[in-house]
Image: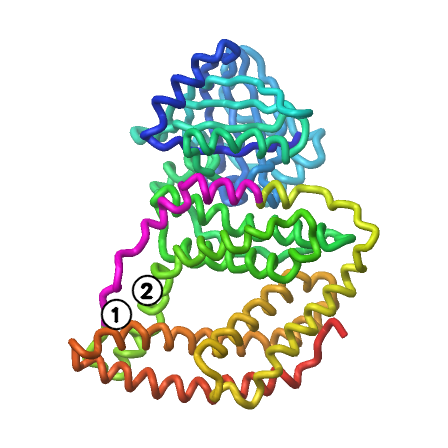
Amino acid sequence: MCEIELKFQIPHNYRAAFEKAFKKNKLVQQQRLWAKYYDSPEQHLAKQRIALRQRLEGDIWKQTLKAPSPQHYERFELEHELGHDAPELCDLACYENHKQARKILKKALDGSEVDLTLQFETDVLRYSQLAHYKNSQIEVAFDLGEIRQGKNSVEIYEVEFELKQGEIADLIAYIQPWIKKYHLWLDTRSKSQRGNMLYNNETMIPVQQQSTLQLQHPENMHELLAQITQNCLAHLLPNATAIASQDYASGHVHQARVAIRRLRSSLKIFAEYDALANNNWESQLATLFQQLGSTRDQDALRESLIPQLENAGSPITELPPAASENIAIDAIFRSPTTTLLLLQLMSFAHSAAIADAESKPFKKVLRKRLQKMHQQICDDTGHFQTLDVESKHRTRKRVKRLRYTVEFVSSLFAEDDVKTYLKTLKPLQETLGHFNDLMVAQGLYESHAQTEPKTWFVLGWIASEERHISIQIEQDLQQFAESQPFWS
């Protein structure tokens, strides 16, 4: 009923060694899998990330319905045998007696009867083996083939690890040596998603935004942090896949950075209360964030600063050349270091808390942390303009961290009280973000002022804007200091 699997791409320079080692295992079974995927002409199912396929496995046709869950690696799956004869159409009658399947299809198809048509096909040669690791059973499937839609096709060359029985922690621990040996990188795209992209002549998966976190009754700090980590990973992983596959836009990079920043914030705030949290994760995420930084800063300034300079009549309407070449960020998300870090965070997100008789009531700890963060920001009220550069950065980071924390835990408090509090926090964060963009731009242009005199116009405009924004920040800080904390 529930499928738990992780899929990985195999780098070209490791494929020969991987394939040779995999196929020589005497326990490996070989099977050809030919599948046909169906949807309405309007692609109602694809829009809900639902897959409906008929697949020939040996000499038996099977129809499978798959639907997403909050975690990309866990999916609802319902399979029906259709017999030896190839079906002429895709019939939904087999789901009439299954409550969850009916609900999924009714929501996707708006409760109406539609004609389902063939969208694309997959033709795969699968090499699989069943591994026993600790108390778990794991199927490793190495797939070679293609996705076809009309005259177009894309290659399938990937490996999937599916947990047939046991614990997710065992699945992830079993995968790690494969990552180190063959540099496998995590891919959240299903075959059906790639097929739909081929059908629509698309090469890029959508940018993944963060989703609202509805906490499921956490009873301790570990359960709280684990649920937050799951939410942040659901935000990060699809964007990481887009970047790793080299089919990405600036939005993927921006959202990857936001997701990493949210993870870092949660670890900084809550990890000290959780014995299972690794002290190295926050610093590893910080390094990953910094590697993405130069690319995103340039993109953000092009989108926000350049139009303002054009409106001001600036003689320069381009960013200065980067001081050094940008890191190939796609390679970062294909590296074993990054992949192993992501797997460790997944394992943590599904682990059970360690019994601790001395653990404090988590809501009391949470209120104390929120109050401390709130007060630290209030302490800057009235003298932001006199702070040095580092202290101004510190204020911005504190505001952003508080915003993330409020979003993480908002479902534990009265909705109206949280909304009222955010009405003063959000404008402050936005104004501080604008101020930070100006400081970043100032640093870029100052390095070129001696060789390009026209740059002084830009620097003068930036200085004027910084003074104006500083006054606005003082006002926003004052309004925030007068706000009523919702956790009191």
Q: Which residues are magenta?
A: 318-344
Q: Is residue 455 left or right of residue 224?
A: left
Q: Which mark is residue 77?
A: none
Give above or below for 112 relative to 484.
above
| Nearest to the observer: residue 52 or residue 391 | 391
Q: Quadrant of the C terminus?
A: bottom right
Q: Is residue 195 magenta?
A: no
Q: Which mark is residue 298?
A: 2
Find residue 346 and report its image quarter: top right
Q: Earlier in the sequence, mark 1 or mark 2?
A: 2
Residue that mark 1 sits on: 319
Q: Label 2 sits on what residue type?
A: Gln
Measuring from the top left, give residue 268's x and y in whole percent. 60, 60
Measuring from the top left, give residue 131's x and y in whole percent. 58, 20
Give above or below for 360 relative to 280.
below
Report helix, strand or loop for mark 1: loop
Q: Is residue 360 left or right of residue 453?
A: right
Residues packed near mark 2 inside 10 Å, few (<14), some (14 to 19) or many (20 plus): some
Measuring from the top left, give residue 45's x and y in whole percent. 52, 40
Residues packed near mark 1 inside 10 Å, few (<14), some (14 to 19) or many (20 plus): some
Q: Quadrant of the N terminus?
A: top right
Q: Residue at x 41, y 53 (%)?
A: 252
Q: Is residue 90 left or right of residue 185?
A: right
| Nearest to the observer: residue 232 or residue 104 | 232
Q: Is residue 340 magenta?
A: yes
Give above or below for 51 relative to 227.
above
Instruction: Work out how far the residue at label 1 is from the one at label 2, CA to CA, in angstroms.
Output: 8 Å
Report helix, strand or loop for mark 2: helix
Find residue 448 and report its image quarter: bottom left
Q: Residue at x 66, y 25 (%)?
A: 134
Assess whether mark 2 and mark 1 are in contact (beta carbons under 8 angstroms).
yes
